[in-house]
Amino acid sequence: CEHGGICNAKGQNTFDCKCVGPWRGIYCGIVDACYRSPCENGGSCLNIYDDYWCKCSNDYYG
């Protein structure tokens, strides 16, 4: 596991990673751009590759 992720053994040759901080993905190698909740006024954050997109709530746009 990368970036301080915690490795959990699942069997003799298998494992999974519990990612920490802004990291996600199978091996914790993808940064989560939504980790710090960058969207304002109740908008929903969507990860798009190495960036993010905010879906605004009904009363807001931008």
Image: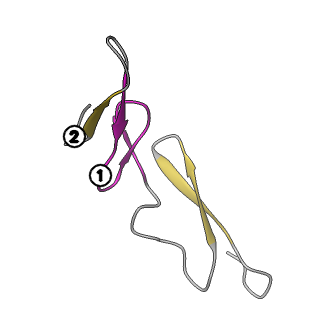
Q: Residues within 10 Å of mark 2 (few under 14, many from 20)?
A: some
Q: Is residue 43 above or below residue 26?
A: below
Query: What residue is drawn where x is 67% and y is 75%?
Result: 62
Q: Nearer the viewer, residue 37 or 17?
A: 17
The dot on residue 58 is none
Query: What residue is drawn where x is 35% and y is 30%?
Result: 27
- Residue sitting at the far right: 58
Left or right: where does residue 36 sit relative to residue 41? left
Query: What residue is drawn where x is 80% and y is 82%?
Result: 58
Q: In the image, residue 50 lies at what x, y percent?
A: 45, 43
Quarter of the image holding residue 30? Answer: top left
Left or right: where does residue 4 sit relative to residue 26? left
Q: Is residue 7 above or below residue 41?
A: above
- Rendering colour mode: secondary structure
Magenta-highlighted residues? 15-32
Residue annotated with mark 2: 3
Task: Tell me the amino acid under the disc marked 2.
Answer: His
Quarter of the image holding residue 46? Answer: bottom right
The dot on residue 20 is 1
Q: Residues within 10 Å of mark 1 (few under 14, many from 20)?
A: few
Give the SS element for disc 1.
Answer: loop
Q: Quadrant of the N terminus?
A: top left
Q: Is residue 22 above or below residue 60?
A: above
Q: Are marks 1 and 2 in contact (CB under 8 Å)?
A: yes
Left or right: where does residue 10 sit relative to residue 59? left
Query: What residue is drawn where x is 63% and y is 75%?
Result: 43
Q: In the image, residue 51 lies at what x, y percent?
A: 48, 50
